[in-house]
Image (cartoon, helix red, strand yellow):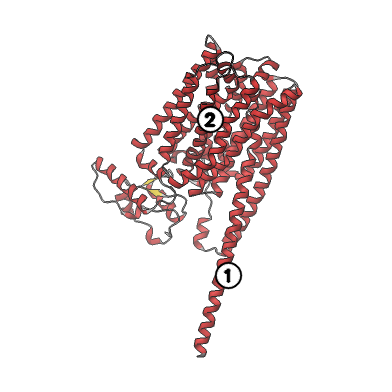
């Protein structure tokens, strides 16, 4: 009886202890979830001042050309000056993020944004185009790198099925900032009748965003300290191996796979048909559709609001259903049709604006929302976390190229036309054609890069279901049959991130690698089969698919 009573007491104690542990774990999970949402809000506010200030020239296009006595081509130099340095510097900024850390990058780049906007504001005060242009150059060098750092921070806190949802919310705040700029900046100009006050108001907003960045970094650092303490308590030989940090170098570029580069080209064409168009949108609406400059600024808010409203819904929906290649195709189609409508629509009648132009403006915002919720997360799914900064640095380099060149081309098209109305119609058709190339590259994902890009259709590309694993296996076998290869594929090649594969028995001998090397494909862009599998087994730094 005493033995039974003792056993029963021990069982009761263990039950109580396990319940306490469960409660503690639930409390920790709740705190972690609430912290994640705080980080998400701060990350949104981090780019508010940046996005508000970026489109100051667009909201003041007519005023800038008059006050500074500059042409449309010279006006477009403000956006070219912003984008041109990023052709080279975003890749360096991405490596800086990977080497020095996300927090250092956020603090440094956000501080430079404040300084740059201050220079631009003084340029407006002295009515000096060249001072403003110098400020735009400095602004651009930091702005794009800050965006990369923000994306890297979000990908650190939100992974898998949460990523598109987080990106959707992240893109809401900048669009609200751009909409606020289109509405508020012309109003401030009209009230004070000058460039000084609206530009210095942008400096104030950039400073507030810098403060949000400081708080964001403090919370992230504290969270990292807690994680290290937990790792110290439960540290073993395996964790010691996993804690080794690899250095990032430019050689990692060679390991990025074909799917990554196709996505980069699609992103480049999409951004090239969105941002440069909006750079001239204020004058576009005035000259082609006969809106006043105040009406143009207010109507342009519809584009930004459409993106801001749809992004929080599109992100979770894409996370729920997957099928990202299909949504990428829809994105490119939306861009192409939208710009075709801009080129096709006629100007207003009887001195009245063409209010039907609101339709493509809303469609443009929805197109950008799709871009943010589908294309950006897709890039993160096909690269390793440790080189995420470098990958987005490459993306920034390509998109900056299009954002630097397309405004110049658009300016020449408008100035070379008989009338501005005709010139802007041609610009609409030009951007529509650019988007058609994006459609072609998207189709190539289905036919020429199906094996690697199929993971984008999975609900969680980082952790596919058994059914999705079987799809991957069937695709690989079909490709092998087309090549006349009929060897069996070893199931041990499927190493999914998160599996317990630390035992030495999982490390295959050279005969295994020699037999199966042609079948092993890494969605994370590893250059050799053995390197890829060893990383999956020992470090869990990427998922392997075939």
Q: Position of residue 391 (x, y in %)?
A: 50, 39
Q: Is residue 364 above or below residue 491?
A: above
Q: Is residue 123 visible?
A: no
Q: Position of residue 374 (x, y in %)?
A: 48, 39
Name the residue rendered at 40%, 31% in the picture.
441
Q: Is residue 214 above or below residue 403?
A: below
Frontmost residue, 179 versus 374: 179
- Label drawn at residue 20: 1
Image quadrant of residue 306?
top right
- Near mark 2 (Cα within 10 A), the count class, few <14, some 14-19 or many ≥20, is many
- Label drawn at residue 198: none
Q: Depth-wise, is mark 2 or mark 1 nearer the camera?
A: 2
Identify the residue under disc 2.
362
- Near mark 1 (Cα within 10 A), the count class, few <14, some 14-19 or many ≥20, is few
Frontmost residue, 155 versus 238: 155
Name the residue rendered at 55%, 20% in the picture.
354
Q: Earlier in the sequence, mark 2 or mark 1?
A: 1
Q: How far, Cα to Cα, is label 2 from label 1?
A: 53 Å
Q: Residue furthest bottom?
A: 1
Secondary element under disc 2, as helix, strand or loop, is helix
Frontmost residue, 16 versus 103: 16
Name the residue rendered at 62%, 43% in the picture.
43
Asked if disc 2 and disc 1 are in contact, CB closer than 8 Å, the reply is: no
Q: Position of residue 215 (x, y in %)?
A: 68, 47
- 264 sits left or right of 30 in the view: left
Q: Is residue 9 visible?
A: yes
Image quadrant of residue 134?
top right
């Amino acid at each position: 009886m005493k033995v039974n009573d003792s056993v029963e007491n021990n069982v009761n104690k263990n039950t109580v202890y396990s319940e306490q542990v469960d409660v503690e774990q639930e409390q920790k999970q709740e705190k972690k979830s609430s912290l994640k949402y705080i980080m998400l809000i701060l990350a949104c506010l981090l780019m508010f001042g940046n996005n508000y200030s970026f489109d100051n020239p667009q909201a003041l296009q007519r005023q800038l050309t008059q006050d500074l006595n500059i042409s449309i081509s010279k006006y477009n130099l403000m956006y070219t000056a912003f984008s041109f340095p990023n052709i080279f510097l975003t890749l360096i900024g991405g490596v800086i993020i990977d080497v020095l850390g996300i927090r250092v990058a956020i603090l440094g780049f956000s501080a430079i944004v404040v300084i740059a906007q201050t220079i631009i504001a003084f340029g407006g005060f002295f009515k000096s185009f060249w001072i403003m242009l110098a400020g735009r150059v400095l602004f651009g060098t930091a702005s794009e790198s800050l965006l990369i750092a923000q994306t890297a921070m979000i990908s650190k806190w939100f992974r898998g099925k949460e990523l598109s949802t987080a990106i959707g919310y992240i893109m809401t705040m900048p669009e609200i900032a751009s909409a606020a700029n289109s509405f508020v900046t012309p109003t401030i100009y009209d009230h004070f009748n000058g460039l000084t006050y609206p530009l210095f108001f942008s400096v104030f907003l950039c400073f507030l965003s810098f403060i949000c960045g400081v708080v964001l970094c403090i919370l992230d650092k504290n969270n990292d300290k807690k994680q290290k303490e937990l790792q110290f308590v439960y540290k073993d030989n395996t964790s010691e191996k996993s804690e080794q940090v690899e250095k990032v170098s430019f050689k990692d570029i060679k390991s990025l796979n074909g799917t990554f580069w196709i996505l980069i080209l699609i992103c480049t064409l999409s951004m090239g048909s969105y941002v440069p168009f909006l750079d001239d949108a204020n004058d576009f609406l005035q000259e082609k559709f006969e809106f006043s400059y105040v009406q143009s600024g207010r109507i342009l808010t519809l584009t930004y609001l459409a993106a801001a409203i749809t992004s929080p819904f599109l992100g979770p929906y894409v996370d729920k259903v997957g099928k990202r290649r299909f949504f990428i195709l829809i994105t490119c189609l939306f861009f192409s049709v939208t710009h075709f409508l801009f080129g096709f629509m006629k100007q207003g009648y009887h001195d009245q604006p063409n209010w039907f132009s609101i339709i493509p403006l809303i469609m443009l915002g929805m197109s950008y929302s799709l871009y943010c919720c589908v294309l950006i997360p897709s890039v993160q799914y096909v690269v390793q976390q440790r080189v995420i900064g470098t990958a987005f640095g490459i993306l920034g380099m390509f998109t900056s190229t299009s954002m630097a060149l397309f405004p110049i081309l658009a300016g020449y098209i408008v100035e070379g036309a008989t009338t501005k109305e005709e010139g802007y119609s041609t610009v609409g058709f030009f951007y529509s054609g650019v988007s058609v190339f994006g459609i072609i590259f998207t189709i190539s994902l289905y036919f020429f890069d199906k094996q690697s890009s199929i993971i984008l259709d999975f609900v969680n590309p980082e952790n596919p279901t058994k059914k999705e694993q079987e799809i991957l296996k069937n695709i690989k076998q079909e490709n092998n049959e087309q090549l006349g290869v009929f060897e069996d594929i070893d199931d041990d090649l499927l190493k999914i991130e998160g599996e317990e594969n630390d035992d030495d028995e999982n490390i295959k001998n050279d005969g295994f690698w020699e037999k199966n090397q042609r079948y092993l494909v890494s969605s994370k862009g590893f250059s050799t089969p053995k390197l890829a599998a060893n990383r999956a087994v020992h470090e869990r730094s990427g998922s392997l698919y075939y």
